[in-house]
Image (cartoon, helix red, strand yellow):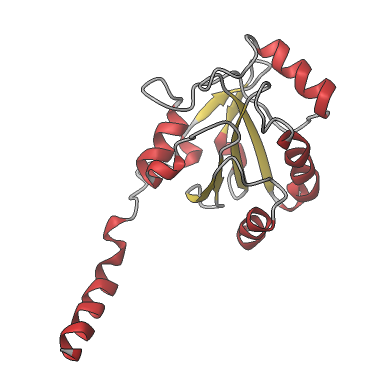
Amino acid sequence: MRKVIFLLSIIMFFFKTSATANYEKKIYDFNIESITGEIINFQDYKNKVILVVNTASYCGFTKQYDELQELWDKYREKGLIVLGVPSNSFNQEKKNNADVKEFCKVNFNINFPLTTITEVKGKNAHKIFKWAKENHGKSAVPKWNFHKILINKEGKIEDTFLSMTKPMSKKLIKAIENIL
């Protein structure tokens, strides 16, 4: 019996990567429109760690903007990009980009990159969110606002974090520091 368990363990070890993503594309193959209309080309973020966060102005988690800014201030010189993706996928965002931009500046003094208001789930989700689901599974699909997708320097998803995980939490900080 021990031999059978041992052999099964060895077989499982060699085939454990069979369920991992093949990443035909990496985050660097995409772009997204910024809140001011310019194109954010992820090629510009090569060899950086990227934290993609879907945001919303009217959410109970909106106070996380403060910690996202703190995270950006603390780690951007070390190679972290914080990217806020305003979304109305959960019906809690303002109606236009100008209002979102003003809200973020006035209430949180945000200076990390923000995108245009973007769908983050379902058939109308932006390509980067479809890519995330395709390569990382359901955990990459935002279940609510302020869902976090951490992308490593190779342009692949390192991990995902639910809305309840605060940006300055030990868990998220450790994950970021491990790949910076």
Residue shown at 43%/24% (left/top)?
125
User: Up-down: is 61 above or below 175?
Assistant: above
- In the image shown, does 103 or 76 lie closer to the viewer? 103
Q: Identify which residue, 46 or 67, lies in the foreground.
A: 67
Number of numbered callouts drawn: 0
Q: Quadrant of residue 63?
A: top right
Outermost front residue: 60
Question: Which residue is situated farthest in the bottom direction here?
Answer: 2
Q: Quick one: quadrant of the N terminus?
A: bottom left
Quadrant location, the C terminus = bottom right
Front residue of 63/131: it is: 63
Where residue 113 sits: x, y (%)?
A: 69, 30
From the top left corner, tell me how far across and down residue 47 is, in percent. 60, 50
For residue 14, what is the image quadrant? bottom left
Write the residue at 52% across / 28% down: 31
Q: Position of residue 136 (x, y in %)?
A: 40, 46
Residue 11: x and y, percent? 21, 75
Q: Nearer the viewer, residue 50 or 165?
A: 165
118 with respect to 68 (left or right): left
Whether 100 is drawn above or below 32: the answer is above
